[in-house]
Amino acid sequence: MLEELHVRDLALIEEAWLEFGPGLTVLTGETGAGKTVLVGALKLLVGERGDASLVRSGSPEALVEGRYFTDDEEEHTARRRIAADGRSRCYLDGEMASVGALADALGPLVDLHGQHDHQALLRTGTHASLLDRYARLQDLGAAYREAFRDRAVASARLAELTDALRDREQRLDHLRFVVAEIDAI
């Protein structure tokens, strides 16, 4: 979950800090208040394309930073810098990253909905997780993976025991044959 957003020198915003609580966050305000720029900042942080036109006039670069927690409660940071010449740099936890890495890390944690902007609902890959979250089955994926691993271990052990049993039966058949040969002599 995105906890905090810092925006500096992006379009008309000189500097803004936002803290988000759990659940739904709604940005409201009058026309021209900067809602669209804040939403644009979020989109930059989740991997949307950015260019020099986003940098505030007279500033060397625009900066968007976010602090977020993953489902396993680990804290992470993401940063995106867009220079006045249009070059973009991305960082995850202080390490350089690609725009795709930002999208992979933050995309599943942030879902933006506007008049015609409902991203996750259009991505079929998110449908199962949305349904699981609605049914309060978030940990089902981890439980399934663990059960699948346990099944694989049990299957391997069964194969070992089956092979050992077959080897034992072959050895017994051989020994019976040897005993029969000895008895015949």
Image (spheres, helix red, strand yellow):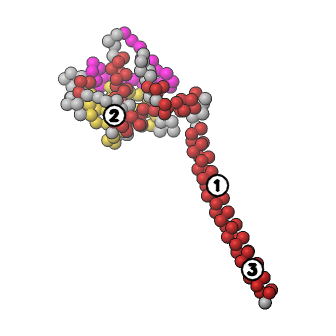
Side (left or right) of 155 relative to 51: right
Q: Is residue 124 above or below residue 117?
A: below
Q: Nearer the viewer, mark 2 or mark 3?
A: 3
Viewed as shown, does residue 64 lie left or right of 4? left
In the rendered structure, which segment of residues is drawn in magenta? 8-30
Inter-mark Cα distance, 2 to 3: 76 Å
Badge number at residue 177 = 3
Q: Pick the quarter of the image with the C terminus.
A: bottom right
Which is nearer the N-term, disc 1 or disc 3?
Answer: 1
Number of residue marks: 3
> Which amino acid type corresponds to the residue marked 1 in the rendered image?
Ala
**Residue under the image location 29 percent in, 28 percent down:** 50
**Which percent across, then down, holds residue 168?**
70, 71
Measured as percent of width and height from the top left, residue 36 is found at: 35, 18
Circle 2 SS class: strand
For marks 2 and 1, give the CA distance: 45 Å
Alpha carbons under labels 1 and 3: distance apart:
34 Å
Residue at the spot 28% in from the left edge and 32% down from the top edge: 81
Q: Earlier in the sequence, mark 2 or mark 1?
A: 2
Give the structural element (helix, strand or loop) at label 3.
Answer: helix
Examine the structure image and report whether residue 11 is included in the region drawn in magenta. Answer: yes
Disc ID at residue 154: 1
Q: Secondary structure at mark 1?
A: helix
Type of amino acid at the residue the image marks with label 2: Arg
Which mark is on residue 79?
Answer: 2
For image coordinates 21% across by 21% down, the residue present is 57
Q: Where is residue 5? Give x, y as percent.
A: 38, 27
Q: Are marks 2 and 3 in contact (CB under 8 Å)?
A: no
| Residue placed furthest toward the top | 30
Q: Is residue 12 magenta?
A: yes
